[in-house]
Image (cartoon, rainbow, N blue to C red):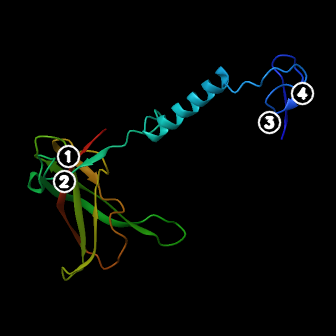
């Protein structure tokens, strides 16, 4: 129980009293405009965040699947390896990582993403490492030729003597 001031005479009374003991004025059970405004603002803020209306939320691209939502297919893309090597980039100790590039050709009518599969082969053409990756992340590859990085596409393995690349999937990335 706490004490509050009477709005009429400023006398002190219990917050559970039905009337002021000093002047007899009944305690108002009506909410003040300040309380109503505060509840409305809190309600608006809660609604705003619950429905995703936050203007500070980044506009991340969403994935539109192939083939249902994309006019592009794997056959619309070709890939050619320009170069690759495992380079030692440390001066104090050995720390090799893959460097290289490839040219992706998008023959589709629209810019589209392409997922690549890279395979590292040994001297006997036996696969010893592989990885699937989107070389342009969530960005579409423009129509025509684009040089993409193969840097760090595979972990270092001294047995890898050559690599193969193939397009295994396509997606059209669209902003919301």
Is tag 3's residue or tag 1's residue first in the polypeptide sequence? 3
Horizontal and vertical percent for residue 146? 21, 46
From the image, which quarter does the N terminus lie in? top right
Residue 121 lies, in percent from the top left, at 23, 76
Q: Quadrant of residue 111?
A: top left
Spatial distance from mark 3 to mark 2, Cα to Cα? Answer: 68 Å
- Horizontal relation, residue 26 to residue 57: left or right: right
Q: Which residue is mark 3?
A: 16
Q: CA distance from mark 3 to mark 4?
A: 12 Å
Residue contact at pointers 3 and 1, CB within 8 angstroms: no
Mark 3 and mark 1: Cα distance apart in space = 68 Å
Q: Nearer the viewer, mark 3 or mark 2?
A: 3
Q: Quickly name the residue at label 2.
A: 170
Question: Which comes before the other along the chain, label 4 or label 2?
Answer: 4
Mark 1 or 4: in front is 4
The mark that comes first in sequence, 2 or 1, is: 1
Element type at marker 2? strand
Check if mark 2's residue and mark 1's residue have beta carbons within 8 Å: yes
């Amino acid at each position: 129980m706490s004490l509050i001031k009477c709005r009429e005479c400023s006398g002190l009374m219990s917050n559970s009293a039905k009337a002021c003991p000093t002047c007899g004025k009944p305690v108002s059970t009506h909410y003040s405009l300040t309380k109503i405004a505060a509840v409305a603002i809190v309600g608006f803020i809660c609604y705003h965040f619950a429905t995703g209306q936050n203007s500070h939320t980044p506009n991340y691209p969403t994935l539109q699947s192939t083939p249902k939502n994309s006019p592009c297919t794997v056959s619309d893309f070709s890939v050619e390896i320009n170069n690759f090597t495992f380079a030692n980039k440390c001066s104090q100790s050995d720390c090799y990582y893959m460097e290289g590039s490839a040219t992706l050709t998008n023959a589709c009518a629209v810019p589209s993403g392409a997922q690549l599969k890279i395979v590292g082969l040994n001297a006997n053409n036996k696969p010893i490492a592989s990885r699937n990756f989107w070389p342009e992340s969530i960005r579409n590859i423009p129509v025509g030729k684009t040089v993409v990085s193969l840097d760090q596409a595979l972990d270092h393995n001294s047995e890898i003597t050559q690599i193969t690349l193939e397009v295994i999937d396509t997606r059209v990335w669209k902003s919301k």
